[in-house]
Image (cartoon, grey):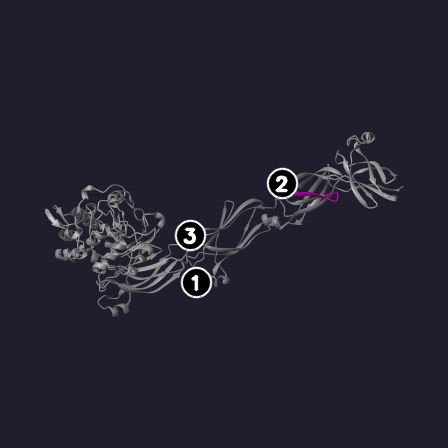
Amino acid sequence: MMRPPAPGIAARSKTLTALLGVLLMILGALVAVPAQAVPTAEVGVVQAGPAVDGGIVRAADLSQFRPGNIVSDAVFYNAGTMSEAQIQAFLNSKVTACRAGYVCLKDKTDLTRAVGADAMCNAYAGGGVESAARIIFKVAQACGINPQALIVMLQKEQGLVTDTYPYDSQYRIAMGQGCPDTAACDSRYFGFFNQVHGAAWQLKRYANPPGTSNYFTWYAPGKTWNVRYHPNIDCGSSPVYIENKATAALYYYTPYQPNAAALRAGYGTGDGCSSYGNRNFYQYFNDWFGSTQVPDSAHIPIGNLEHIASVPGGFQLRGWAADPDTSNSIELHVYIAGVGRSYVADLDRPDVGAAFPALGSRHGFDLFVPATTDGGTPEVCAYAINVGQGSSHRVLGCHTLVSQSGSPRAQIDQFAFVDGTLRIAGWALDPDVTDSIPVHLYVGGTGYGFAADRDRPDLAAHYPGYGTRHGFAETVPLSPGTHQICLYAINAGIGSNVVLRCTTVMMPGSPDLGRTPIGNLESVTTDAGSAVLTGWALDPDTHGSTKIHVYVRGQGAEYTADATRLDVGAAYPAYGAQHGFSLRVPLPEGRSDVCAYAINTGPGGNTTLGCRSVTVATAPFGNFESLTAAPGSLTATGWAIDPDVAAPIDVHVYVDGVGTSHRAASARPDVGLAFPASGADHGFSITLPAASGDRTVCLYGINTPQGPNTTLGCKTVRVP
């Protein structure tokens, strides 16, 4: 149950005291998470805070803390451990002097009342004022609870055993009984007597004694439950095998186990995911009263886990187990990753009978325990189950093993289409069995089943213990058309069927179904006056290569798509890879529409693979009309046009090999009349400085935007 920390090293303030009642109502705790659904508890379960006693001498070895057996039944339900006088003496020893104005537990009294007997407790003869020691003693006798356990719970819940200045609020909820995590504490349980008797009654109720309903089942002994570390679910949990009723009762009361940080901290504080209630119970009990376990080795089961191994589909366990209190065969519980199965150790073991003649020889076991996980490395634990006076079961052994279980393993070596058939080959096995497993092949709605039972010696080294009869090789017919083909390895144990391959394929064949060709015109580029077309095409009705027709400005030519295209062969394995094309088609100058068609080899239509518009650039043209000279300069005149554009173009002028760029943009009406599509603004008259002497001048019309340039001519002139 979650309660404020017990008084400890630091002094408390009145403000903290005032807040205690509020904290009790708002500090929540979550019911532990077992491996199956958990009902709502009859009494609210909240978690204990850390109880730290500054004066305690630490003796308990927390490395020995066992979450599945915090206290044995023999200890917890032993009401005869202390007399009233011994209880009083113990309380006196824990507080030598109480602060003035306060009543410590050793001096505490309370008005008690008579309580009738029921399935949990015998009658309590109350009435009158009784000391805390007497109340603890009488409740222990009436309810069959160890008074030492009640003392420890008073300490771990409110720190009352060692507190030198306890408040009335602490006594009011001394054991935390009747304080659910979702509401205020139930006033019917207020007061020291009501708390002690009510808590003892509740601890007995958790065991579902005869005459009560079987309500408390989610920490039932003899099973593994997921027990949280903290109310915060993000702190996680771990599986705990609950060994006895007393430990189950403590988890119903405080449903959290200490994490490693809490155990390392002793009486101190661990980390943000630590809880302390059950740690403190164990620690206080050991420090004050000795072990929580009865040295009852003479009554605890005996045995030996002689062999444990992972085998296909599960685990092999051999050994023996017996209970010293009976000659009958006893149960053996085996847990794999927290999932348990029950067996009986009843095989004849003459050697055990000779060693323990009083027990007989029917105590052996040789078990195959099925795996519970899809592979992985689960922990496998074997327990000999107590049937006599012993307080706990015997752990025969826990081992972490690789589980040989799960979905099938397989490999496809061949998946080929040959002459109207599908040929498949490979291997498949299920790690849960050594037998051959089925392989199912589906072609559309038609199924084929066969066994993977051909000899595959190569598997022996990789899967020892499974044999070699796990291969398959089959051929099935395929009709022309489109088929979805799926291949499965069929699961035999844990896991599920495995899809080895699932693909949609087209099949050629006879008769021709008249299907139209398929393909792709992937690119059209120009190069040196030609169009280069790349792509692929195939006719679904034939393995053969497909004809391609290419049209340029309405003029057609025939080609064959027979180049190797491995990607096409992989996508259409029934057709091979010889269906690619890379074609060079001559182009006229200017803009042209280029269209490619895949031609059907039989009945049915052709397929347009695509059309692209391309342009072959036209060279500029013009006239270098004149070259004249004057002292220190020369002048070149003429005109230049690029038929691909209407705009003026550049003219490059080279004088004795030294070039300059100029724009032919002067108005030339005569040129405009001659070439109306280009306009009149294409003339030039270019004057350049020049040294005296003979000078050679060459002019070039520059192509726009690309293509070959044109030499307009070269002339020589003498500059004076």
Looking at the picture, tell me which residue is in the foreground, 231 or 544: 231
Looking at the picture, tell me which residue is in the foreground, 257 or 515: 257
User: Crowding at label 1, few (<14), some or many (≥20) Cα neighbours within 10 Å?
Assistant: few
Percent from the top left, x then y, of residue 427? 50, 57
Percent from the top left, x then y, of residue 566? 62, 51
Is disc 3 in contact with disc 1, using a CB cutoff of under 8 Å? no
Q: Predominant secondary structure in magenta? A: strand
Who's the residue at 81% across and 43% down the image? 654
Q: Is residue 535 visible?
A: yes
| Sequence-earlier tag: 3 or 2 | 3
| Sequence-earlier tag: 1 or 2 | 1
The picture quadrant where one finds residue 95 is bottom left
Q: Is residue 436 magenta?
A: no
**From the viewer's perspective, is residue 11 above or below residue 698?**
below
Magenta part of the chain: 522-530
Label 3 and label 2: CA atoms lie apart by: 44 Å
As drawn, the label of residue 465 is 1
Q: Can residue 116 be seen in this view?
A: no
Is disc 3 in contact with disc 2, using a CB cutoff of under 8 Å? no
Looking at the picture, tell me which residue is in the foreground, 247 or 377: 247
Q: Name the residue under label 3.
A: 495
**From the viewer's perspective, is residue 660 above or below residue 329?**
above
The picture quadrant where one finds residue 552 is top right
Label 1 and label 2: CA atoms lie apart by: 54 Å
The amino acid type found where label 3 is placed reads: Gly
Label 3 and label 1: CA atoms lie apart by: 20 Å
- Mark 3 vs mark 1: give the one in front: 3
The amino acid type found where label 2 is placed reads: Thr
As drawn, the label of residue 516 is 2
| Sequence-earlier tag: 3 or 1 | 1
Percent from the top left, x then y, of residue 72? 23, 58
